[in-house]
Amino acid sequence: PGLPMAPREGRREPTPRGSRARQSPTRVSKNLVRVASEYAPDGSRSRTWFIPRGAELSEENISSSDDAGDGAAFRAPASTLTRWFARMFLPEDYPHSVSDDYAAFQAWDTAQGLCSYVRGSLTTKALLEGVGVGATGATAASAAAQFIARDMCGMVGGLVFTLVKGRHLDAEAKQWRLFADLANNAGMAMELAAPLVGNQHRGWFLALACAGSVARSLCGCAAGATRAALTSHFARHRRNAADIAAKEGSQETAVTLVGMCVGVLATTATGGRIGWQWAVFVALTVAHVCCNVRAVRALVIDSLNRERVRRLLARYDETLDDVRRGSVTAGAGARIIAKNSPRGLAKDEALLPVGMNWVLWPWYRYRGAREVRSVHLGAPVGSASREETIDLLRLLRDDRPADSASGDQPVKGRKYALVSPRAHARAATRVVLSVDATTGDQLEAYVHAALTSCAILTDLNGSRILTEAEADDWMRRHYDGFIATIEGWGWDTKDRVLLA
């Protein structure tokens, strides 16, 4: 109670057809009355139909003019090309059919893609030189064998990555998207360096080429999976994911064509000068990383994952302290809402999956709350000891209210139970879920586990991890208010909770 809240952030509603906001003024005689307007597939008005003022609606009296007001039956060629361009590269009814962050993300994504394709021409040239193209004594069989070995290593690397990290890609789509491009940079650098090392030790060329293929395979797996997740995000209001994916493919094709042309020019200009090749590569890599960081920062996603839940818990605790002190004014409340909304939190989210942000040091340092003890959500009952298993089964029985593993002060309706670590301080906190646990139950379970596993809440002594009794008390007193508050800040707590 008393916490600043705002309605859920929504997409801009499209202006109804026929309103002044979406119509260009058409100069017509004062003696004519508009009776109908014709619209193009992209939603723009293309032709207007008139009759003389006071006349009856008949074939003899009706006339038409295009939106430019020149009386022609069709638009000018430039306007037609503009419509074709929009239909080729933009989703139908853009910008009303996509989320607000679509344009900014696609702009930066296009720029980084251009940098990648230009560098790809340089690495392709380096690999061909490495396998002996243009050298005396090189055979096609030897070159084919090296390329096959390189491709096989990349495929194996992709399979292993999917096995280990596949379930995390939806929840941390932004972070894995940037990881994919950094892996691509590393792979390209190794491929460009492979011929230089191979001149001294032939075996090192194949090793570096295979390592580069593995890195680029990781990029392909992570980028493809996160692209599907981001497409769903862009299309969540209109369910037009197929259209958005098709237009993304068109944009990618156009950027590839431009990148290939520029890449050929760059390859020709640098020739055999290794220093110039590396100078161009490093400059484009820096631009590539900057564009990708801006693209990731442009995304505003209102679904909850583990990191966002931890950040929102910390900010909710700060807001509670402000309310207790009576320091929340009308102006301060608006600032709190803006800071804790999906758009405000996006500025502070981790750039890479937690545990990998050291890669960007010293340009970036992650300052969020980490899991001091990892949380295993959905742990099997058999992961507990025999005594704990008996308690868990008793707590999760249909005819008994559920509570944490301690069994103290059970809470009716709880669909999970915590198995707190007892062996050592850094052991995982295991969460056993009931078979009928909903998305909301899983969110509640993770919040409860995070309080006992992360230094989130603060007191006079700073941030600290709560004991089981303190976490139980916090859940009883504040959990419902926490959910209502973050919903008011604009977060989706029901349909899009991703806590894998």
Image (spheres, grey):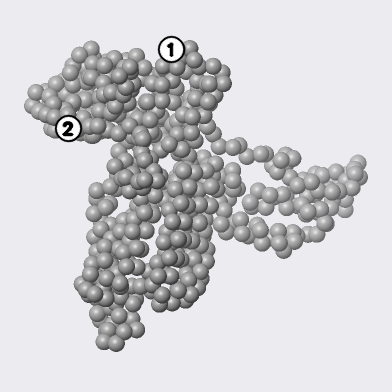
Which quarter of the picture shows residue 402?
top left
Amino acid of disc 2: Ala
Residue, x 35% and y 50% (percent of image)? Answer: 179
Q: CA distance from mark 1 to mark 2?
A: 35 Å
Which quarter of the picture shows residue 357?
top left
Residue that numbered label 1 is attached to:
324
Q: Is residue 148 left or right of residue 101?
A: left
Residue, x 23% and y 16% (percent of image)? Answer: 469
Q: Name the outermost residue toward the bottom.
A: 136
Q: Residues within 10 Å of mark 2 (few under 14, many from 20)?
A: some
Residue that numbered label 2 is attached to:
427
Q: Name the outermost residue toward the left.
A: 386
Query: On the rendered image, what quadrant is the N terminus found in?
Result: top left
Element type at mark 1: helix
Instruction: Report how many numbered discs are placed on residues in the image.
Output: 2
The answer to whether residue 252 is above or below residue 375 is below
Residue 200 screen position, x and y as percent: 24, 75
Q: Is residue 279 left or right of residue 78?
A: left
Is residue 400 in sight in this rendering? yes
Residue 252 screen position, x and y as percent: 48, 60
Query: Mark 1 vs mark 2: which is more N-terminal?
Result: 1
